[in-house]
Image (tube, coloured by chain):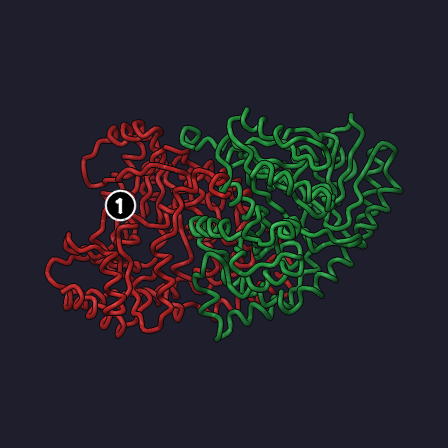
Chain colours: A green, B red
Amino acid sequence: MWDQIFATRMARMTASEIRELLKLLDQPDIISFAGGIPDPKLFPAKAFQDAFAAALGPVMQAESLQYSASEGYPPLRDWIAGQMQELGVPCTRDNILITSGSQQGLDYLGKLFLSPGDTALVSWPTYLGALGAFNAYEPNYDRLCLHTNRPPADYAQRATAAGGQVKFAYASVDFANPTGETIDRAGREALLDLGDDLNIALIEDAAYQSLRYDGEPVPPVLALEIARKGDIDACRTIYCGSFSKTLAPGLRVGWVCAAQPVISRLVLMKQASDLHSATINQIAINTVARSIFADHVANLRSTYKYRRDCMLNALSQNMPAGVEWTRPEGGMFIWLTLPDHIDGATLLAKSLERQRVAFVPGRAFHADGSGGNTIRLNFSLPDETTINEGIKRLGALLR
Amino acid sequence: MWDQIFATRMARMTASEIRELLKLLDQPDIISFAGGIPDPKLFPAKAFQDAFAAALGPVMQAESLQYSASEGYPPLRDWIAGQMQELGVPCTRDNILITSGSQQGLDYLGKLFLSPGDTALVSWPTYLGALGAFNAYEPNYDRLCLHTNRPPADYAQRATAAGGQVKFAYASVDFANPTGETIDRAGREALLDLGDDLNIALIEDAAYQSLRYDGEPVPPVLALEIARKGDIDACRTIYCGSFSKTLAPGLRVGWVCAAQPVISRLVLMKQASDLHSATINQIAINTVARSIFADHVANLRSTYKYRRDCMLNALSQNMPAGVEWTRPEGGMFIWLTLPDHIDGATLLAKSLERQRVAFVPGRAFHADGSGGNTIRLNFSLPDETTINEGIKRLGALLR
């Protein structure tokens, strides 16, 4: 019955490999580098206790439990605008929409720009959740190349041949999921040039922006564009931020920062899709962010930096020749490239059976189905002992 | 720049008349019957204080603040399945998806079924938020007629002529927003017949289901279909429920109850669009629902019933001949039909200026742009004195 009624777009939505995999990880003897989640022991639980208690106290309870504006809670939008300012993005609350995590921002941007057959430019590999969000709007994908001389006309011609036009380029800019790599300043400038040449939107996914452990911060693409054009409202870059990696993912609070014509369309979309993000969560996040954000994130950075270093050391000590990996300056992930003949999914099956170590095979992150010989390792959740033991086992399997 | 890049579906998304109107209502001397919101003085704030404190206590904090499953929090899905059972819908948690309010359920169902040019059947008038959610997927609308002998082939032929097929019928079944009217059992059976004849999905919007003040409860359409077919997984009815009218809208927690093939598709959609609804809110709602739901809703019913009666009395005493209105058995709204020559939007402008009374003009609730001589009044928010004074002023204006 149902297959005759579902819309064609459902054909593009399939169960995520990661999701299915994660169902296996409840088994207690598994060492998992598969997750992409913060360490719950580091959550600022005390600050949230106080913030929710205040939100439900006599002064705020009626507001916290009630419907609220689709744009989001104004004091939180003000605080975010202040943070954006510190990153070189002068803006006001009118440039900020609160979303239910940055994932919802990506979904809305797919909905805002993509008609079936249009082209989205993404890196190979790219964030799996972005592909999941965009797939519902039936795009084609083309490979975003920032450090080559691929001419803009080439992107445009391919998109036309595929029956649409290029609508946006999506880039996870800092310590990207899955590779951990950062787009350098030259790459960001090249992205801006491409955006202007093709007249497309640029989606800057900055979910990991605060989690830099070393190296020099690179200004957001949006900041570089404002430096060129003078005003956020003249900019084509749409910045997606999140509190999921800094304060807590379970509250589902993120934001989009962009030119007002984009924000005003997204507000209509928000209203039509779920009215607004949870009022009480926005109020609590606002309280916690204003009281402890900088100190808390500094603490996260120090713990995650240590774990990254443990994993990089363990990889050096245990991986055989022919295995290569990234050395991320922040974030939660290290990306391994295996010899060509090794398939990540096959390796995972063996690894779970023989070594009880889990990770995410890399193919799903590639819009063209390549990347079979890659895997993603997470270092934010496991502690030092677990990292050392798990990488030792993985090295033994690969040798 | 942007208009050349936005997807065509954006053309169907326009600022809501209600939304723009509500911006005016901050002025303190306005008597407003325009809202559609619960009375915040009736929120179970103490119960939520305790529930959030427990959710953030040592046992639960790591889970409450963390990512969670796209399907929703299992104990809450179990509790909802139990409630559905009491309504005559035997089901398990596998038939329940937690959504961010029932609004998100409607958005997902539009996305699940509608390709551009397909037809959605809706009543004239219908819930404005449903039209808003569906519009993003570029449907045509045809009028759902349950108490006439409109032949199924007529719906199908019109849909084909419009370039698609009928994909679903949407019905707000109890004390509907905006009319307050309930679809009787014969109407629900007719809806099921139509669904089978056309092989379409049936979307049952039950957001107000718990708020019945008198009269006999009518079984959900889904319960009637299970009575015919024996098993929820053989049913085409998709039930959308919400805690927004019973516990608190600011937490954004609702649900979809349907056959597993539908739920499994919606779970993929949920994962792609915002991963999951806020974990902590689901945990808190579960605690509050299990401890006070029945008693709390009984209390709401008694207060809202009294306000409904006040408004019906005031209408009888103040409205001139030629004005007609519904007598809802529950919910939050009374629907007025004015003489043909009076336009609701024009009347609102006059009413705000001369009488300082607000309401919602009815045209926006009509997919065909008719209904100019209708208005919606809310009785859940204003107290008795306000209702009497506001209706007196409105009567004076209409005389």
Q: Nearer the viewer, residue A54 or B306?
A: A54
Q: Nearer the viewer, residue A119 or B324?
A: A119
Q: Nearer the viewer, residue A119 or A291?
A: A119
User: Tag 1, which secondary structure?
Assistant: loop
Residue at figure coordinates x 83%, y 46% from the top left: A312
Q: Residues within 10 Å of mark 1 (few under 14, many from 20)?
A: few
Quarter holding residue B351: bottom left
Q: In the visual, does B341 lie left or right of A326?
A: left
Chain holding disc 1: B
The picture places residue B339, in percent across and down from the top left corner, at 14, 55
Q: From the viewer's perspective, is residue B293 above or below residue B104?
A: below
Quadrant for the C terminus of chain B, please: bottom left
Q: From the viewer's perspective, is residue B186 above or below residue B60?
A: above
Quarter holding residue A399: top right
Residue B80 visible in rendering: no
Q: In the visual, does B66 lie left or right of A317?
A: left
The picture places residue A237, in percent across and down from the top left corner, at 59, 47
Q: In the visual, does B320 lie left or right of A236?
A: left
Mark 1 sits on what residue?
A: B369
Q: From the viewer's perspective, is residue A115 above or below residue A25?
A: above
Residue at figure coordinates x 73%, y 59% from the top left: A300
Residue A338 visible in rendering: yes
Count of numbered tags: 1
The picture places residue B287, in percent across and down from the top left corner, at 50, 61
